[in-house]
């Protein structure tokens, strides 16, 4: 495979600074590869199933972690943080779906996201697409309360995260509300990274240098996402060296915290 490195853009100053963290990045790369190997062993052939949806989310988390890692090495720290925001989102959704197999959130996620991405995104919807959507609802036994307005201003399927309605008793259908269904502390990390969503915040434009705080924050985010994924989803498939790598990364994180208290 040929990669044309000469045509890659790079923030050279940041990349040089990141080189000073080659040990940390090497550990992070090993962690990503171990997580990827373990996730791949959980492969499910039926995409349209609980296990299939969990597998897709798990693969996405690893894939986005790899993208963030590569952007860090190139010195594109804002890009890395934008990707890490997606890592957090996928981690939250994965944990909700994985932990609530009984509530079958995966079915409502499938139906809502299919409708949003296939039907609502088109000016003219084909009869085939509509029939497929109706067939999905029937095949998965989607509740009428999810599809119909009833006593509400709009049906749950029209809410941003309506597929969480079985758990979302307070009906906070925003990302903060969804994070609270998993762990209230999750939202803080997302909130701190929110300026990176579209790269429009003034703070993002004023600061793009590779400070120690920014680098460690990215390392911690990737570490936590992958550690939680592996321990929750594929612990039995992980490599024997996983504990050694995670302990080394944790030691670096704790030392950093102690030195900056």
Image (tube, rainbow, N blue to C red):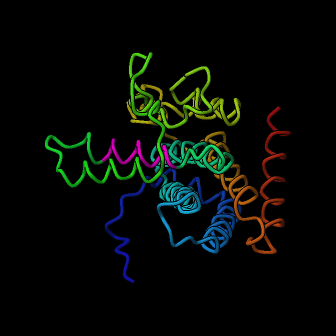
Q: Tell me if I can see residue 109 in this picture.
A: yes
Q: Quadrant of the N terminus?
A: bottom left
- Image height of 206 relative to 258, above or below: above
- Lateral position of residue 253 relative to residue 187, left or right: right
| Residue at image coords 62%, 32% | 167
Q: Tell me if I can see residue 15 in this picture.
A: no
Question: For the view shown, which residue lies furthest in the left direction?
Answer: 124
* Nearer the observer, 197 or 135: 135
Q: Position of residue 187 (x, y in %)?
A: 63, 31
* Nearer the observer, 222 or 6: 222
- Lateral position of residue 193 relative to residue 122, left or right: right
Q: Position of residue 177 (x, y in %)?
A: 58, 26
Q: What span is colored magenta in the figure? A: 107-117
- Image height of 118 relative to 70, above or below: above
Rendering quarter of residue 211: top right
As for residue 114 lying within the magenta part, the answer is: yes
| Residue at image coords 39%, 35% | 198
As for residue 22 lying within the magenta part, the answer is: no
Q: Position of residue 4 (x, y in %)?
A: 34, 74
Q: Quadrant of the C terminus?
A: top right
- Image height of 254 relative to 12, above or below: above
* Nearer the observer, 96 or 70: 96
Q: Position of residue 163 (x, y in %)?
A: 50, 37
* Nearer the observer, 12 or 136: 136
Most frequent secondary structure within the magenta stretch = helix
Question: For the view shown, which residue lies furthest in the bottom direction?
Answer: 1
| Residue at image coords 53%, 57% | 53
| Residue at image coords 73%, 55% | 232
Total marks in image: 0
């Amino acid at each position: 495979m040929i990669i044309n490195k000469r045509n890659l853009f790079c923030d050279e100053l940041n990349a040089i600074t990141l080189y000073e963290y080659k040990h940390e990045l090497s550990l992070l790369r090993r962690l990503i590869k171990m997580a990827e190997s373990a996730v791949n062993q959980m492969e499910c052939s039926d995409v349209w199933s609980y296990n299939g949806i969990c597998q897709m989310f798990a693969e996405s988390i690893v894939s986005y972690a790899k993208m963030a890692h590569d952007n860090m090495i190139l010195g594109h720290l804002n890009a890395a943080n934008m990707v890490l925001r997606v890592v957090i989102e996928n981690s939250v959704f994965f944990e909700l779906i994985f932990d609530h197999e009984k509530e079958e959130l995966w079915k409502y996620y499938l139906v809502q996201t299919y409708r949003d991405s296939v039907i609502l995104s088109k000016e003219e919807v084909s009869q085939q697409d509509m029939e497929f959507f109706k067939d999905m609802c029937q095949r998965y036994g989607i509740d009428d309360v999810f599809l119909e307005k009833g006593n509400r201003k709009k049906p749950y399927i029209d809410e941003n995260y309506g597929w969480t309605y079985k758990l979302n008793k307070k009906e906070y259908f925003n990302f903060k509300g969804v994070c609270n269904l998993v762990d209230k502390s999750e939202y803080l990390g997302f909130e701190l990274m929110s300026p990176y969503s579209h790269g429009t915040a003034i703070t993002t434009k004023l600061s793009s240098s590779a400070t120690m705080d920014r680098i460690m924050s990215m390392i911690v985010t990737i570490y936590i996402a992958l550690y939680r994924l592996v321990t929750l989803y594929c612990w039995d498939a992980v490599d024997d060296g996983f504990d050694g790598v995670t302990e080394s990364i944790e030691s670096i994180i704790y030392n950093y915290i102690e030195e900056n208290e």
